[in-house]
Amino acid sequence: MQRRHFLYGAGAAVVALSGGAAADESLPSSARAPAQPISFAPPPPLVPIRARADRIVAINVCSRPFRAQGPRIEAERIGRKTVVHNYGHGGSGWSLSWGSAALAVRLAQVTRETRIAVIGCGAIGLTTALVAQRAGLHVRIYAKERPPETRSFNATGVWSPDSRICTVEHATPEFERRWEDMARLSFRTYQTLLGLADSPIEWRDGYMLSDTPFDQPAGHGDEREPPYPDLERRLLADIRGPMQALEPGQHPFQVPHARRYSQMIFNITAYARLLLDDFLRLGGEIETRAFESPRQFADLREKTLVNCTGYGARALLGDETIVPVRGQTARLIPQPQVNYGVLYRNHNLYVVPRRDGILVQAQADGDFGNADTTVDRAASEAAVARLAGLFATK
């Protein structure tokens, strides 16, 4: 059976589109479990999303760095340098960043160097640098780009810790233990960032919609994609948000089946700025520099480096275990009153109510293994049209 994560940024706690039967992997991990037989307050009236193509203000494409084996977090000697690798997180980079950084920094500390370099300034690079600073290390970041130019800045921005994180055959007990440690540490860290100015992290409700009952199989995704393990549902059941089955009169959408879920989202514009400001405030330095070969590491003054180059590691290190997974999102003009997300299964439609714009994700067959970052405006306009149809009156 093929599983396909309609990322929440890549995927899960409310985004993983794939084929499934009773467990329906086309649903976000939190939504795959049966709706809870609990009493919830009635859903509040929803302000309709003004879904029109002329409200699209940005379309972005990025390549997610998927590795069948999972993230590469290990140390090696390259010349006279110790290089700790921390890349290849698929669609789970933002979600696992703090836990992944903790593992990488522990490896860097083995060298007993008090000054280290971090290569890369995206989601993984910034969090790794901050974790190292909090451990008492002096950190200099070397990067060609910094937010908002980094690839991870264009992510969907949702809690999706098992989105394209590895293939089923590589989900060994040891891998699962390490993944769970990373996910739980990251989750705890994100809870400490709630309620801050500009809302870098927040919880939002969302609506899972379907034309067919949720206990019926969803449509199959791209057959070229490998099967992914459903880790969040099995290993993080205690921290997933609740799910509520809704009756037709309890929501405004033109579909027969709906559920309400809760998800954690990252307002990446504010969150990336927070990370960057914190890093600089703690004495961090950033040097603009491009690397075309690991031989250039020898030029750096630091003896211990942490390589957080994400998809860039494929070219930099010649690491062909990294598979690009194309992702395209469009942003609609923000509507402050729209504080809910939408996932329409079998229709490749996923909406995230971020503060910097209503994010509409477009996904298509052929994204897996596709490194093309050319914007396909027609695909985003079609996704926006599908969204508009959910509010149309019959």
Image: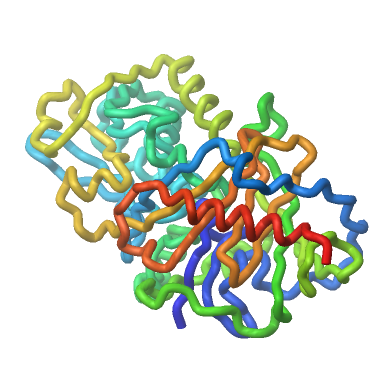
Whether residue 335 is visible: yes
Task: Looking at the picture, tell me which residue is in the foreground, 268 or 301.
Answer: 268
Question: Considering only vertical position in the picture, is 276 above or below 378?
Answer: above
| Image coords of residue 60 (percent x, y) | 45, 43
Residue 352 falls left or right of residue 45: left
| Image coords of residue 369 (percent x, y) | 31, 62
Residue 149 falls left or right of residue 340: left
Q: Quadrant of residue 222?
A: bottom left
Question: Considering only vertical position in the picture, is 303 above or below 218?
Answer: above
Please report the residue visible at 26 percent of the width from the left and 42 percent of the height from the top: 84
Total number of numbered labels? 0
Residue 186 falls left or right of residue 128: right
| Image coords of residue 315 (percent x, y) | 18, 47
Task: Looking at the picture, tell me which residue is in the foreground, 346 or 166.
Answer: 346
Task: Looking at the picture, tell me which residue is in the foreground, 238 or 60.
Answer: 60
Please report the residue visible at 79 percent of the width from the left and 74 percent of the height from the top: 256
User: Which image quarter holds the C terminus?
Assistant: bottom right
Please report the residue visible at 34 percent of the width from the left and 17 percent of the height from the top: 285
